[in-house]
Image (tube, rainbow, N blue to C red):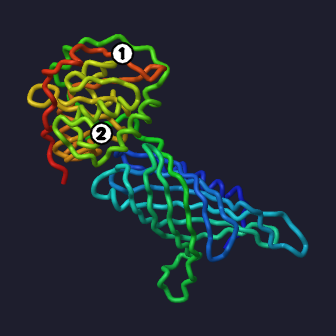
């Protein structure tokens, strides 16, 4: 046990938080912040309010730095008086998301385990005593939307650097944390497998670029709504020609339905959807969350998906049995990387409406999109 002041503990938290991004691997990453509350049920102490910063990668591993401070002052010097001091603490943890360790990063219910080191401070007769410690625990994250998770964990904190089973080891202190995780993204534009992309010439190259529509809604703002709507239908089965969640979707039926929820009318097929909005370069570095990406099937555009950010697409896939996320960094994802031939940015105007930009929307003889031929998920 050593004596120090609160600013030193705060400096420790800041330095740990700053080290997290530098320690991350070069893989696609997700940066998030988590405001939380800590409770000590065994001691009955005042709850603590805190903030965590987490950098997670595709492998399921993450680094997390957190700090918290009590909501009430503590003063053990009741006889002669003294300054009121609030207990505080900071932790640096290594986290493993069990549901993502084999399948890469995705937004799903994910249990996790963690272990780390920390420092805490409390009042001792008007001065602050700091204690080094280590802790371990487990928790669960539950998605609430396209960028927010509900978070809860139980932590067991050891006051000394000994194993809990060691002889004369102190009993661990139980700590409960609950909060909301807000995903900020990370890693910039997706660059699957070292930034590979293919600029393949196809019918998409002959489409004239329509005039850019004036809008008051940025691509990033509309993307949050589009992806949030798309996530509501995860698990809906694939059906050739399907256009509704009650019967199933094919690829373009899904994108048409999702964008219609945002007041944007898209044509029926992937081939026709590749003619609307603003054309983007056929390079994954040019797409942003909410953009449409099209894929070549049998010499023509025959599949469409929504780029969801963090190296993923969300789409209705016949090879994937329905609406799902696919990670472009996986073996299956390589197929989509290699077959992408067009990308379009479709943004609603200020009234939430969009004019049709392509002919043939009402063509009853149009050819529907067939199944995709990506490798089956493992």
Which is in the foreground here, disc 1 or disc 2?
1
- Determine crowd level at label 2: few under 14, some 14-19, many 20+ residues with C-alpha closer than 10 A: many
The x, y position of residue 170, in whole percent, is 57, 83
Q: Secondary structure at mark 2?
A: strand
Nearest to N terminus: mark 1 or mark 2? 2
Residue 39 is left or right of residue 31, and the answer is right
Q: Which mark is residue 256?
A: none
Residue furthest out toward the left: 298
Vertical placement of 344 versus 136: above or below? above
Q: Is residue 194 visible?
A: no
Tell me what residue is drawn at x 44 percent, y 45 percent.
145
Tell me what residue is drawn at x 21 percent, y 41 percent.
317
The x, y position of residue 359, in whole percent, is 23, 13
Residue that badge 1 annotates? 355
Q: Is residue 118 visible?
A: yes
Quadrant location of the N terminus in the rendered image: bottom right
Residue 159 is left or right of residue 20, and the answer is right
Residue 339 is left or right of residue 46, and the answer is left
Vertical placement of 239 versus 298: above or below? below
Depth check: 99 or 109 in front?
109
Quadrant location of the C terminus in the rendered image: bottom left
Residue that badge 2 annotates? 313
The x, y position of residue 159, in whole percent, is 59, 75
Vertical placement of 177 versus 295: above or below? below
């Amino acid at each position: 046990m050593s004596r120090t002041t609160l600013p030193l503990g705060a400096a420790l938290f800041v330095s740990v938080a700053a080290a997290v991004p530098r320690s991350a691997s070069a893989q696609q990453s997700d940066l998030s912040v988590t405001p939380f509350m800590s409770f000590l049920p065994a001691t009955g102490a005042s709850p603590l309010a805190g903030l965590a910063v987490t950098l997670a990668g595709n492998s399921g591993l993450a680094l997390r730095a957190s700090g918290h401070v009590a909501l009430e002052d503590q003063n053990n010097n009741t006889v002669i008086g003294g300054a009121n001091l609030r207990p505080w603490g900071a932790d640096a943890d290594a986290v493993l998301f069990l549901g993502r360790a084999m399948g890469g990063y995705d937004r799903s219910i994910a249990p996790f385990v963690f272990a780390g080191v920390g420092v805490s401070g409390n009042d001792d007769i008007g001065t602050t005593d700091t204690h080094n410690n280590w802790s371990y625990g487990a928790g669960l994250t539950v998605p609430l939307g396209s960028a927010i998770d509900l978070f809860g964990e139980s932590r067991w904190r050891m006051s000394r650097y000994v194993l809990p089973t060691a002889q004369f080891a102190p009993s661990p202190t139980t700590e409960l944390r609950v909060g909301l995780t807000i995903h900020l993204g990370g890693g910039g534009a997706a660059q699957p497998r070292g930034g590979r992309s293919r600029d393949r010439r196809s019918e998409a190259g002959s489409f004239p670029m329509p005039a850019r529509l004036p809008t008051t809604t940025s691509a990033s703002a509309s993307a949050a709504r589009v992806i949030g709507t798309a996530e509501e239908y995860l698990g809906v089965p694939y059906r050739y020609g399907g256009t509704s969640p009650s019967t199933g979707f094919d690829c373009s039926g899904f994108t048409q339905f999702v964008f219609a929820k945002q007041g944007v009318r898209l044509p029926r097929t992937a081939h026709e959807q590749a003619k609307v909005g603003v054309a983007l370069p056929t390079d994954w570095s040019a797409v942003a969350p909410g953009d449409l990406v099209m894929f070549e099937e049998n010499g023509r555009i025959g599949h469409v998906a929504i780029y969801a950010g963090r190296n993923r697409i969300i789409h209705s896939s016949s090879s994937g049995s329905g609406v799902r996320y696919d990670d472009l960094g996986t073996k299956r994802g390589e197929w989509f990387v290699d077959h992408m031939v067009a990308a379009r940015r479709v943004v609603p105007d200020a009234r939430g409406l969009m004019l049709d930009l392509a002919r043939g929307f009402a063509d009853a003889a149009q050819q529907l999109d067939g199944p995709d031929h990506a490798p089956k998920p493992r």
